Amino acid sequence: MKMLSKKKSIEYKEIEDPWNKTITYNKRKRGFIKKGMELSVLCGQQVLVAIYNKVNNKLVIYQSTPDFTPTEVNNLLSNEITKTNMYEEHSNTDLLSGGNQKS
């Protein structure tokens, strides 16, 4: 009989060591952009991923199509979509509170 085990909860905290932080950032950045690409290709969605590296003062942007720009996202945010709450908003609080509280 196979026993189901509970998933271990992970304690999230900032990485202190600068070298490890840089390595983790680069690996996770690539993975995050890849997930954006997969979501776009597999599900036919418009995706814009923006990552701001505050250490190097560098903005990294992935756009699923050339016309889906940060300006287009701003237009969507100021559109009727946001006025009728037809969007999702998430922050680090969702992760730290133990799950996806907003949908």
Image (spheres, helix red, strand yellow):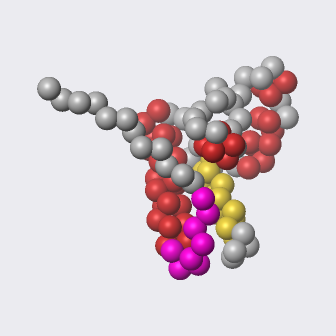
For the point 74% across and 42% down, the residue is 73
Q: Is residue 62 magenta?
A: no
In the image, residue 96 above or below residue 25: above
Residue 87 found in image quarter:
top right
For the point 50% across and 40% down, the residue is 40
Q: Is residue 85 left or right of residue 21?
A: right
Return the x and y of residue 36 as percentages of the image width and height: 52, 47
Residue 18 visible somewhere in the drawing: yes
Q: Main secondary structure of the magenta part?
A: loop
Return the x and y of residue 77 as percentages of the image width and height: 80, 36
| Total residue callouts | 0
Find the residue positioned furthest to the left: 1
Q: Nearer the viewer, residue 54 or 43?
A: 54
In the image, residue 92 above or below residue 3: below
Q: Nearer the viewer, residue 101 or 11?
A: 11
Residue 67 visible somewhere in the drawing: no
Q: Is residue 45 left or right of residue 38?
A: right
Quadrant containing the N terminus is: top left
Return the x and y of residue 22 as percentages of the image width and height: 55, 74
Quadrant containing the C terminus is: top right
In the image, residue 15 above or below residue 102: below
Q: Nearer the viewer, residue 94 or 76?
A: 94
For the point 61% across and 63% down, the residue is 14
Q: Is residue 102 left or right of residue 20?
A: right
Q: Is residue 18 magenta?
A: yes
Find the residue positioned furthest to the bottom: 19
In the image, residue 52 above or below residue 38: below
**Where does the magenta region start and end?**
13-20
